[in-house]
Amino acid sequence: MKILILGNMGYVGPSVIDQLRATYPDAELIGHDIGYFAHCLANPSYLPETKLDRQIFGDVRDIPGELFEGMDAVINLAGISNDPMGNKYEEVTLDINFRATIRAAKLAKDKGVKNFVFASSCSMYGLADDSPRKESDKLNPLTAYARSKVMAEENLEPLAANDFVVTCLRFATACGWSSRFRLDLVLNDFVAGALVNKQISILSDGTPWRPMINTKDMARAIDWGVSREASNGGKFLAVNAGSNDWNNKIYALAEATASVIPGVDISVNPHAPPDKRSYRANFDLFKKLAPNHQPKEDLLSTVNEIKTNLVEMNFNDPNYRNSQFIRLKVLGLLQSKGLLSSNLQWVKSAGHR
Ligand SMILES: NC(=O)c1ccc[n+]([C@@H]2O[C@H](COP(=O)([O-])OP(=O)(O)OC[C@H]3O[C@@H](n4cnc5c(N)ncnc54)[C@H](O)[C@@H]3O)[C@@H](O)[C@H]2O)c1
């Protein structure tokens, strides 16, 4: 088994490497990443990429076709991966998340790759009524990020064939621990705030629905996509990836956090403009098609996992919303130092430090 993982050096990548190594101990695993956040480690005891056979630094926008030669499966995690970054770098987001994804899929198909797994997002449901969104429901992408995922899915579909099986996993919002931990994700932010500031400050009024998934469970779903047969879900499949038990209102996430870390104030922002994103997702199809790769983590175990790891690394930055654990800040800092150009390419001659 030979698997190429694009965008492996982010938040989700380390869990994917762990999962694939466990399922395929002898597989050849190759990572490819531009390395925007390679340095943003949360004090792991080893570099996650050491479990790979090879790490390649490169830009997925001009990835060479030869890299796909001999691969059985390609997983595409590479992307500008949230709404704030998508808003700031709108055209780059379309280039990387949509155009580069289609280019990579075409190269993979040309080279005889059997499975292509795309990290899509439930955020394409945008604002929905209270009934959980099914895959066949109307999409309502409200941001550049969500639009880029919709365009990628739409243009992946015609490429799919019985010998080129495409799986788009529409992930719920990620949470949980990672060697490249993030604090720009709602549950992770709540746990850090509770721990360091004894305060959970909800940026909205707390009422929006937000399905969640632990990164380890994302990796389990990706593992399923890597070997999915066309007979199980079709040659092209876009499926909500998560669990019906993990549809929560934002306020409930704060309450769960406060139940694990007592003595915490929860504040909402009554003056915040209404959060434009609120949706529940229906995960029945994923349960039916992937019964052996269902989420195993739950909300309280995830809060505990984040808490334990933050305590272990002596995390005590009260100003963490401006730290290297916020991806938008990292990109801004790299640009302000002249290390990244306006279209997020490395300026190799910059930064003699
Ligand atoms: N985190 C979530 O809540 C969530 C939810 C649903 C879907 N997803 C999707 O899953 C994927 C992985 O998410 P993540 O949280 O690990 O994101 P991340 O931002 O932490 O990691 C993305 C990785 O892609 C790499 N990358 C970006 N542009 C690149 C380029 N031009 N060439 C090569 N590499 C490039 C980055 O360097 C980074 O290592 C993303 O596509 C994201 O949209 C994430």
Image: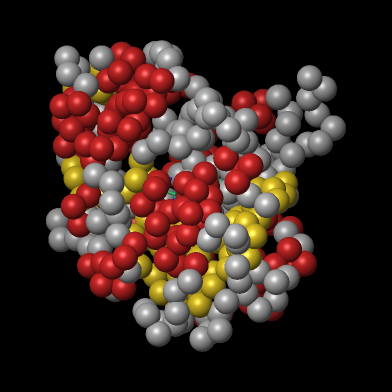
187 lies left or right of 102: left
Residue 329: percent from left, percent from top: 54, 28
Residue 26: percent from left, percent from top: 60, 60
Indicate whether 174 appears above or below 305.
below
- Of 295 and 237, the residue lying toward us: 295
283 lies left or right of 180: left
State whether residue 81 appears in this view.
Answer: no
Image point (78%, 19%), residue name: 353
Indicate whether 56 appears above or below 107.
above
- Of 91 and 67, the residue lying toward us: 67
Indicate whether 8 appears above or below 293.
above
Residue 311: percent from left, percent from top: 37, 19
State whether residue 84 appears in this view.
Answer: yes
Considering every residue shown, the one lying at the far right of the view is 349
For the image, the number of numbered tags is 0
Instruction: Say which quarter of the image contains residue 76.
Output: bottom right
Residue 276: percent from left, percent from top: 29, 46
- Of 62 and 213, the residue lying toward us: 213
Quarter of the figure with the N terminus: bottom right
Image point (39%, 48%), residue name: 216
Instruction: Say which quarter of the image contains residue 60.
Output: bottom right
Image point (15%, 61%), residue name: 131
